[in-house]
Image (cartoon, rainbow, N blue to C red):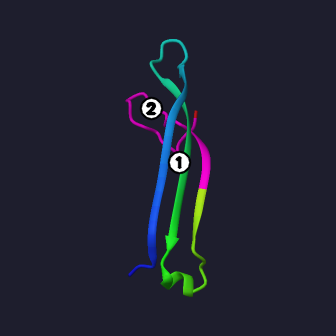
Amino acid sequence: QCGVKNAKGIWKMKRVWVGEGVAGESVKKELFEGYFSFSVSYDQMYRKAGHGSGSTCRFAFWGVRAMKDNTGKEIGLGPGKGI
């Protein structure tokens, strides 16, 4: 057994804003809001080891669509020249 009795989670995202790029560009800028929740219940193995009966993690977050270069390739969050 792995020590986990039950686990469940929720991941939600929705787009809350869309903006057009500067004149002559077809680039759209998008902003998202999201919510994440995860809960786990431990079996006797983890309880006896002192980890308690389980835990829950919840948080809200914001996200932006990755930008694209002139060829349409996503720039992403990696190293780059910036804007």
For residue 2, above or below residue 76: below
Q: Measuring from the top left, give residue 42's x and y in whole percent.
A: 51, 75
Q: Amino acid at mark 1?
A: Pro
8 lies above or below 60 = below
Tell me which amino acid carries mark 2.
Asp
Q: Which x, y percent locates residue 47?
A: 55, 82
Q: Is residue 28 above or below residue 3?
A: above
On the image, numbered disc 1 is attached to which residue?
79
Q: Secondary structure at mark 2?
A: loop
| Image point (51%, 70%), residue name | 41
Instruction: Identify the mark at residue 59; answer none if there is no mark.
Output: none
Q: Which residue is mark 2?
A: 69
* Along the viewing direction, whichever of 2 and 26 lies nearer the viewer: 2
Pick whichever of labels 1 and 2 is earlier in the sequence.
Answer: 2
Q: Are marks 1 and 2 in contact (CB under 8 Å)?
A: no
Callout 1 environment at 10 Å: few (<14), some (14 to 19), or many (20+)? Answer: few
Q: Residue 73: horizontal and vertical position, in percent?
A: 39, 35
Residue at the spot 49% in from the left edge and 23% down from the top edge: 28
Q: CA distance from mark 1 to mark 2?
A: 13 Å
Query: What's the magenta bit mostly, secondary-structure-wise?
Result: loop
Q: Secondary structure at mark 1?
A: loop
Q: In this rendered view, identify the residue nearer to me: 20 or 46.
A: 46
Quadrant in which residue 31 is drawn = top right
**Image quadrant where one finds the N terminus:** bottom left
Magenta residues? 58-82
Q: Residue furthest top?
A: 23
Does residue 11 sit above or below 1 in this rendering? above
Which quadrant is the C terminus positioned in?
top right
